[in-house]
Image (cartoon, rainbow, N blue to C red):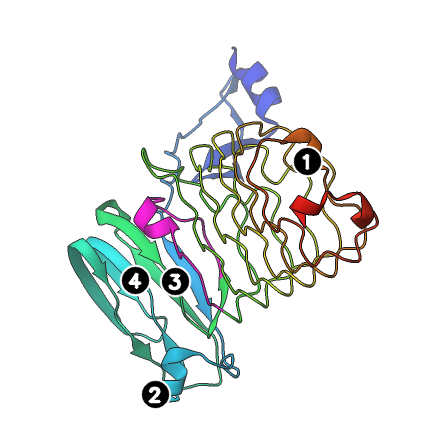
Amino acid sequence: MQSMELKEALHGWVLKGGALKPVNWGCASGGQARTVVKLYAARPAPPPVFQFKISPGPAPAGDRLYNLFHRMYAYPSIRGTGVELDWGDGKTITINAPNSFNQPVHFYDDETREYIVTLRNLDGLTGVRVAENGYLTEILTPIPRAENSALQNFADKCGNLKKIPENLLGAGVSAGADRLTSAFYACAALTMLPPDLLKGAGGVRQFNNAFAGCAGLTEIPAGFFDGCVSAEVMFCVFMNCAGLKSIPPGLFANLPGITDFTGAFLGCSGITGPVPRLWNSHPGAEHVQTFLGCVNASNYDEIPAGWK
């Protein structure tokens, strides 16, 4: 490309430090256009972190640590080597627990503000959980390592958790990790599930109690399980989600390998639309009390006796 053509193509702008910056154009003697372009390397992406938010407010009734100490706290479970844990109040520690989960507890002096807890140096991280924290209100980033020991009970009994990110399993489920058991059990303040929450869960087989007790949940996104091609067990997956109003048609239609729906929607008394006709799509699956208590479902009378 000739210098004049380059000038016209760029229209007076060049890439500088990751952003377009104006450049001065000049002419040499004789009127020939000349261009001076400085090339700048793009700024490297920041290293990945894992973050969650701790917020003030009353802990849920029955919160174990609050009932012991009566203080606002953070309580992650971390396995790994050289992982930096920043509590968000200027204090940090380093986790060196390569073989088992370390569960440090941190109490906050100022209980009137929010804190962002950050994990850094994730190359040495092999598992993280945020379970049993009544002050956890939001998970801000995907899980950096998705292994069985971390996925199970990942955020269970976090009664004030209100928001989780899309593509939570963004790093992908590691080989052999196949259980999302009780991952969000009793997260009663959670009202919605991101459509891409399980995008990386193609290898997960068991969803036992994964969202059970999420009493504030009002809907399930259409296609929520579509990427979960290995799914086999939905034991009590949405049990006692009393705020649930409807179930998307075909929620499990693309998952012929499911063999157990025991208690899947047990106690979901708020459902007013039709429940999926699993007795037709998955007739051989275990189905004890699958729809027990769904008495307000519009097709409740159609549900075979063995399924309710």
Crowd rating for badge 2 (residues with CA inside 10 Å; few <14, some 14–19, many 20+): few
Crowd rating for badge 3 (residues with CA inside 10 Å; few <14, some 14–19, many 20+): many
SS at mark 1 in the image: helix
Spatial CA span between label 1 and label 3: 37 Å
- Compared to residue 48, the image places residue 139 above or below, namely below
The type of residue carrying mark 3 is Val
The type of residue carrying mark 2 is Phe
Comes first in the chain, label 2 or label 3: 2
- Compared to residue 114, the image places residue 27 above or below, namely above
For discs 1 and 3, the disc positioned in front in the rendered view: 1
Q: Are marks 3 and 4 in contact (CB under 8 Å)?
A: yes
Query: In the rendering, which numbered label is found on residue 183?
Result: none
The residue that mark 1 highlights is: 279
Q: Position of residue 172 (x, y in %)?
A: 40, 37
The residue that mark 4 highlights is: 77
Q: Are marks 2 and 4 in contact (CB under 8 Å)?
A: no
Query: In the rendering, which numbered label is found on residue 130?
Result: 3
Q: Position of residue 269 (x, y in %)?
A: 72, 61
Comes first in the chain, label 2 or label 4: 2
Q: Is residue 80 visible?
A: yes
Relative depth, front residue between 4 and 225? 225
In the image, which residues are magenta?
139-158
The type of residue carrying mark 1 is Trp
Relative depth, front residue between 260 and 62? 260
Crowd rating for badge 4 (residues with CA inside 10 Å; few <14, some 14–19, many 20+): some
